[in-house]
Image (cartoon, rainbow, N blue to C red):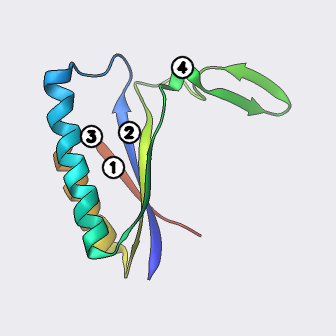
Amino acid sequence: MRQYLLSVYQPDGDPPPPEVLDPIMADLGRLNEEMRAAGVWVFALGLHPASTATVLRDQVMTDGPFAEGKEHLGGFTVINVPDLDAALEWGRRMSAILRPPLAIEVRPAV
C-alpha cells in the first residue's frame, strides 16, 4: 500500500452560495465515508483562502498566495491504496463531485 495526496485546486474568489456549496459538501462527505469504509482514507483537510497565506522565500516574508494565479490549493485528502490506478479512480470520483469539475492533482507521497 502507498499513500497518495489528492489535492483540490479551486478558482480564486468567493465560494459558491450555500444552495450550490451545501450539496457538494454533502456529496464529498459521502465520498469520504466510502473511502473510510474501503479502508483507504487517511485524512482530509480544507484550507482557508489563499489570501490568508504567508510565504517564506529566501528569508523574505510576504503575505498572500505564493504565485499569481486563477486557482489555489483549497484542500486535500490523503489516501492509502495499492497503486496509482486506484488513487486515480478516487481522484476521478472526487473531481466529479466538485462541480463544476475541479482539478484534482494525484501525487504519491514519499
In the rendered view, would you say 4 is above or below 19? below
Q: Earlier in the sequence, mark 3 or mark 4?
A: 4
Please tell me which residue lies in front, 34 or 59. 34
Report how far apart the C-alphas of labels 1 and 3 lie in the structure: 6 Å
User: Residue 87 in the image: x percent, y percent?
Assistant: 33, 68
Q: Are marks 2 and 1 in contact (CB under 8 Å)?
A: yes
Could you tell me which quadrant the C terminus lies in?
Answer: bottom right
In the rendered view, would you say 10 is above or below 89? above
User: Residue 71 in the image: x percent, y percent?
Assistant: 40, 30
Callout 4 amino acid = Ser
Q: Are marks 4 and 1 in contact (CB under 8 Å)?
A: no
Residue at screen point 15% across, 26% down: 20
Q: Residue tagged by mark 2?
A: 9
Callout 3 amino acid = Leu
How many marks the image carries: the answer is: 4
User: Residue 29 in the image: x percent, y percent?
Assistant: 25, 49
Q: Which label sits on residue 104?
A: 1
In the rendered view, would you say 30 is above or below 59? below
Report how far apart the C-alphas of labels 2 and 3 lie in the structure: 6 Å
**Secondary structure state at the residue bearing disc 3:** loop
